Image (tube, rainbow, N blue to C red):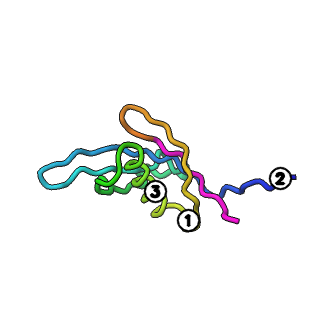
Amino acid sequence: MTKQTKYESRAAVRVRYLGATDRRPSRLVAEDVADGYGSLEPRRIAVEYPQDCEGLDAYAVAAEAWAEKFLRPDYEFAPKVAGFAGDYLFLIQARDRD
C-alpha cells in the first residue's frame, strides 16, 4: 500500500503583467481567483518584474511570493500552470512534507 500525499491548502493564483509607468517599474500582480469563503476582495500581491528571469520563470516568482504570504509556512511550491490571454494561472497545492 502506497502512502498518499495529504493536501492541506490549495489555491488558484492568476499572475498578470503591469507595464512600467512614469512612477513605477514594470511589475507582476498575483491574486487568488476565489478564496471560497465568501470574500469579495481577492488576496493580492505585486512584485517588481524580476530582471534575472524570463517568461514563465518570472511569473513563477510572483506566484511563489503570493504563496509565501498567504499559504501556511511549510508548503512545498510545485504548481501546475496554465497560460491564457497573456496571463498565467498557477494551481498551487500545499502539502505536508515528510
In the image, 79 versus 42, the foreground residue is 79
Nearer the observer: mark 2 or 1; the answer is 2
Mark 2 vs 3, N-terminal side: 2
Is 97 on the left or on the right of 20, as rendered? right
- Label 1 element class: loop
Residue 40: percent from the left, percent from the top?
43, 49
Residue at point 49% right, 37% down? Answer: 82
Q: Nearer the viewer, mark 3 or mark 1?
A: 3
In the image, which disc is placed on residue 72? 1
Q: Identify the residue at horizontal 36%, vertical 35% (top origin).
A: 86
Name the element at disc 2.
loop
Which residue is found at the position 41% from the left and 48% from the top?
57
Judged from this view, the residue extending furthest toward the left is 22
Amino acid carrying mark 3 in the image: Glu
Where residue 64 is drawn, which disc sits there? 3
Under tag 3, what secondary structure?
Answer: helix
Q: Amino acid at mark 1?
A: Arg
Evaluate if marks 3 and 1 touch, with contact meaning CB atoms under 8 Å apart: no
Dot 2 or dot 1, earlier in sequence: 2
Q: Can you name the residue that lies furthest to the top here? A: 85
Q: Residue at x 52, y 51 (%)?
A: 35
Q: Which residues are magenta?
A: 89-98
Q: CA distance from mark 2 to mark 1?
A: 26 Å
Q: Residue furthest right?
A: 1
**Residue situated in front as seen by the camera: 79 or 33:** 79
Sequence-wise, which precedes: disc 3 or disc 1? 3
Q: Residues within 10 Å of mark 3 (few under 14, many from 20)?
A: many
- The residue tagged 2 is 2
Q: Is residue 74 magenta?
A: no
